[in-house]
Image (tube, grey):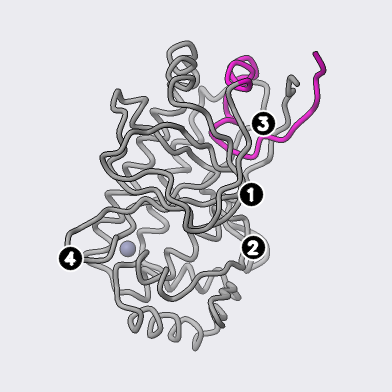
Amino acid sequence: MATNRITIANNLLATLPHKDYKLLLPGLKPVELTFGEILYEPGAPIRHVYFPNDSLVSLLTLVEGHLALEVGLVGREGMLGISLALGVNTSPVRALVQGSGTALRMTSARFLQDFRRSLPLQREIYRYTHVLMAQVTQTAACNRFHVVEARLARWLLMTSDRLSSNEFHLTQEFLAHMLGVRRVGVTKAASALQRHQLISYSRGNIRILDRKGLEAASCSCYEMVRDMHERVANRPERHGNQRKTRIGVTASGPNNRPGPLSRAPQVTADAVT
Ligand SMILES: [Zn+2]
């Protein structure tokens, strides 16, 4: 049995003590997630859980007669399929890949088996569930009370943090779904951010030009969710053989650097092959 050094890009997995990560490893399968792919539908059984590396997945709620509305965003800081850990084997939301990339996938049966055996895994998943709930509830308030321009700024920052990049490709139609507004609303909001030289937006290619400026243009929801990550991530009992994963720390340095969530150290660990 050979041992290799590999990189754990997913923060939730990277936080686990080495022995718990090794317990999970045989059940984790690398997969490519592609833009537009649907991982879960509301009410349908969860067959796999996913730990995103550099992919990004939107959680959407469906309301009759309206566009699907985004209520959460999951990237390398978390996982998909937490309902299983809460004893429910169906998804309450649609999970739609909005940023192509890689993830580690595990069957639901295997996940439940490992979940029962690993207290650190249970602890991490409960903490992440708390953070995701905070994100979802904040998003609900945001969708109701904040103007499209501020919500677009928040959404671009959250996306940038999770993709580790200031550039990404998104169509106006997709953005309209994410923000629950018509395309004309997206055009207006994106034009305003462009006019202030915070972003450039051409044929679906978005580039963040001034991160601090975009943070100022965003509603406070971005900071609130980011701070929630930080409070949970900075807990004293975090342990294991890995460096602490920093999530949601206020960005410092160049004005245009992706947010701290994306700068979480990629931890190395043994991989058994
Ligand atoms: Zn808001």
Cα–Cα gap, marks 3 and 1:
13 Å
- According to the picture, the residue beneath numbered tag 3 turns out to be 243
Look at label 1 and name its amino acid: Arg
The secondary element bearing badge 3 is classed as: loop
Q: Is residue 142 left or right of residue 216?
A: left
Task: Name which of mark 3 and mark 1 comes first in the sequence.
Answer: 3
The secondary element bearing badge 4 is classed as: loop
Look at label 4 and name its amino acid: Gly
Task: Name which of mark 1 and mark 2 comes first in the sequence.
Answer: 2
- The numbered dot on residue 50 is none
Count of numbered badges drawn on the protein: 4
Look at label 3 and name its amino acid: Arg
Look at label 2 and name its amino acid: Arg
Name the residue nearer the viewer: 225 or 13: 13
Q: Residue at horizontal 33%, vertical 74%?
A: 148
Q: Residue 51: percent from the left, percent from the top?
A: 53, 37
Dot 3 and dot 4 residues touching (CB under 8 Å): no
| Of labels 3 and 4, the one closer to you | 4
Dot 3 and dot 2 residues touching (CB under 8 Å): no
User: Which portion, as a residue range, is magenta?
Assistant: 1-26
Instruction: Examine the rendered structure and indicate whether residue 12 appears above or below residue 146.
Output: above
Instruction: Examine the rendered structure and indicate whether residue 65 appears above or below residue 34.
Output: below
